[in-house]
Amino acid sequence: MQRYSPSPGSLIASRQRRRNNPPPGGDSYLPNAGEFYLPFPPTEHRLDIQLGFKPGSRFPCFSCDYKGTAYDTMPKTWRHLNFFQHEAYLHARVPRIDCPEHGVHLIAIPWARKGSGFTLLYEALMMIMAKEMSVKAVSRLTATTDTRVWRIMDHYVSEDVATQDLSKTTRIGIDETAAKRGHTYITVVADLDTGKAIYVTEGKDASTIKAFTEHLEAHGGSKTAITDVCTDMSPAFMSGIEEHLPQAALTFDRFHVMKLLGEAVNDVRKEESTMETVLRGSKYVWLSNPYNLSVKNLARLNTLSGLQLKTGRAWRMMNIFKGLFEFSASRAIEELKKWRVWATRSQLTPIINFAAMLKRHWDGVVRWLTSGVTNGLLESLNSLIQSAKTRARGFRTIKNLKIMTYIVAGKLGQLPT
């Protein structure tokens, strides 16, 4: 493709012609219909901008205070933000200097990072787009390969993670999310005060907690400064927290507790539906918030709950349990003790098992009443991660999923400019 790059002589001649034959209206002149002035051939849909430097200019070494003149130059090209509908490229002969300490090397340039074929502004555009759309779509819109897009994303995510300051981190939430089908997971740790995912790693066992504490202390934090941890009732997480975060008080989010009780109610329904066919297909009627049910399903719930069914009894116990968290902390604890005794005597095996679990994890469950710590933030971040997975139709590697998790949930710092 032939590039248009006017010589200094032609630019001077053009200016002289305009000076000798000024257009009507002076500087505010707008060309008539059909008249226009373009600094590049419009048929190429491309703008090439040539950059240079004054002879004798001195340039700083990238590693010391030495400044030297150009030893020689190397031609470089960078893709820049589009100029209207035209692709834009910057061209420059980048000087090399001969530093007495660091030898001959290219100087650092202000509009692009070392080794990149894109300007900083173009890379910033890619990062913004990647948060809202799939990498495949970004690569298509920016006319580059998805491999190069992933490489750019990896660079800025790694840079942001490396410069994290976790010295003020005291309350965290921990949750796992499925990376792909099977038993492949990533664990996400978020700062509950800043709402930011601060650590992402593969797996969901106790070793992930150890890896987090090492990351925490490498970035100015301290594991003894962690006062609260909110998570689900994963035995692996609890074991890791007990061993590696001994000062932290463990809180089991009310959301997770209610989820387990909902599963117990559904287990009662499944057992009873073998004998009571009226219960078949009624799972979400029992487990949904009545305010969210359609008129038809609400009428069905009213009918079913009025029958002498074990499921109806379990459902009423679930609603009473939910209401206990609205009391003051002292009263709620007393009422929860009574509810646990009631559940133990309910003769509903799934509810009895839930009551036993409640007894085992009593301190973590009731701590929510005083700490108010919830994993709602993690649920929200997990929703963003799953949405990104859906857009991408899955990720080829765990590394790519981790990168995308930081982008959508990590609140990356200042984008390149």
Image: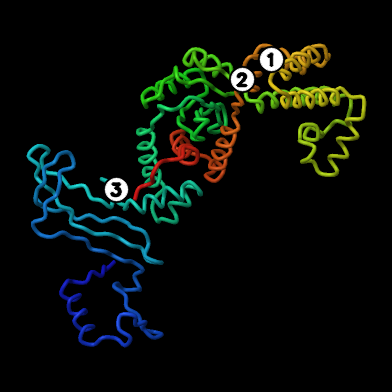
- Whichever of labels 2 and 3 marks the residue nearer the N terminus, that label is 3
Disc 1 and disc 2: Cα gap in Å? 10 Å
Query: Foreground residue, 386 or 394?
Result: 386
| 235 with respect to 93 (left or right) | right
**Tags 1 and 2 in contact by the CB under 8 Å rule?**
yes
Report the residue marked by disc 2: 233
Mark 2 Cα-neighbour bin, 10 Å: few <14, some 14–19, many ≥20: some
The image shows residue 79, relative to residue 246, as above or below, that is: below
Counting from the top left corner in percent of width and height, residue 60 is at 15, 46
Report the residue marked by disc 1: 357
Mark 3 Cα-neighbour bin, 10 Å: few <14, some 14–19, many ≥20: some
**Quarter-wise, where is residue 168 in the image?**
top left
| 328 with respect to 153 (left or right) | right
**Quarter-wise, where is residue 349 in the image?**
top right
Residue at left offset 43%, top offset 21%: 213
Q: Nearer the viewer, mark 3 or mark 1?
A: 1
The quadrant of the rendering that contains the N terminus is: bottom left
Residue at left offset 29%, top offset 86%: 23
- Whichever of labels 3 and 1 marks the residue nearer the N terminus, that label is 3
The image shows residue 71, relative to residue 46, as above or below, that is: above
| 287 with respect to 83 (left or right) | right
Mark 1 Cα-neighbour bin, 10 Å: few <14, some 14–19, many ≥20: some
